[in-house]
Image (cartoon, helix red, strand yellow):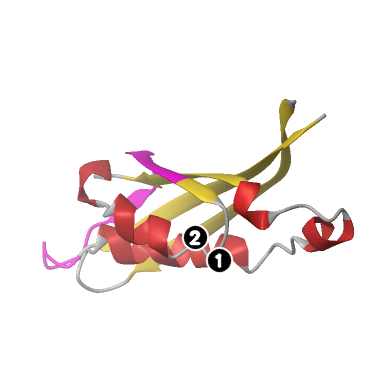
Amino acid sequence: MTLRRFILEMGTGNDLHGGNYTKAALRAVQDALHHSSLSFIRSLQLDSKQMQVEVTIGVQQPELVDCEAVKKSLPHGQVVVKSVKGGLDVPAESDHDPVVIASAAIAVRFNLP
């Protein structure tokens, strides 16, 4: 069996008020999911429980992302989430309440003969 990537989808999310990295990450994941259709799973009669899903979140402060919350937001597969340095913080003019922008990359893989 060979692990093969079938989907690589990207998304962007933000938190305009509150500087919440997890909220921005969740929105980035939802954005990526809304760009994809996994109809090939049914067409090829694959088991979605065997799908391996790797989520990479890019934000300026990766340690502030609740990766478990991001993992729970994905509906199918064996999910692994990691948070890395990336994204963008846009400072507010008043020195508080920055805009947090997160990037998400979601890779979907299956083991196939």
Between residue 18 and residue 70, name the one nearer to us.
Answer: 70
Farthest bottom residue in view: 17
List x then y, in percent, for residue 17: 24, 74
- Neighbours of disc 2 within 10 Å: few (<14), some (14-19), many (20+): many
Q: Nearer the viewer, residue 71 or 96?
A: 71
Q: Identify the secondary structure beneath mark 1.
A: helix
Q: Is residue 90 left or right of residue 29?
A: left
Residue farthest to the right? 43
> Circle 1 sits on which residue?
31
Q: Farthest residue toward the left?
A: 95
Residue 73, placed above or below residue 106:
below
Query: Given the image, on which type of amino acid does mark 2 rest?
Result: Val
Residue 46 is left or right of residue 12, and the answer is right
* Contact between labelled residues 1 and 2, with CB atoms less than 8 Å apart: yes
Q: Does 76 sit left or right of 6 as displayed? A: left
Real-space Cα separation, disc 2 to disc 1, in angstroms: 5 Å
Residue drawn at x 75%, y 25% as measured from the top left: 1
Q: Give coordinates of residue 107: x percent, y percent.
A: 61, 43
User: Which numbered marker is on residue 29?
Assistant: 2
- Please, what is the three-letter code of the amino acid marked with disc 1? Asp
Residue 84 placement: quadrant = top left
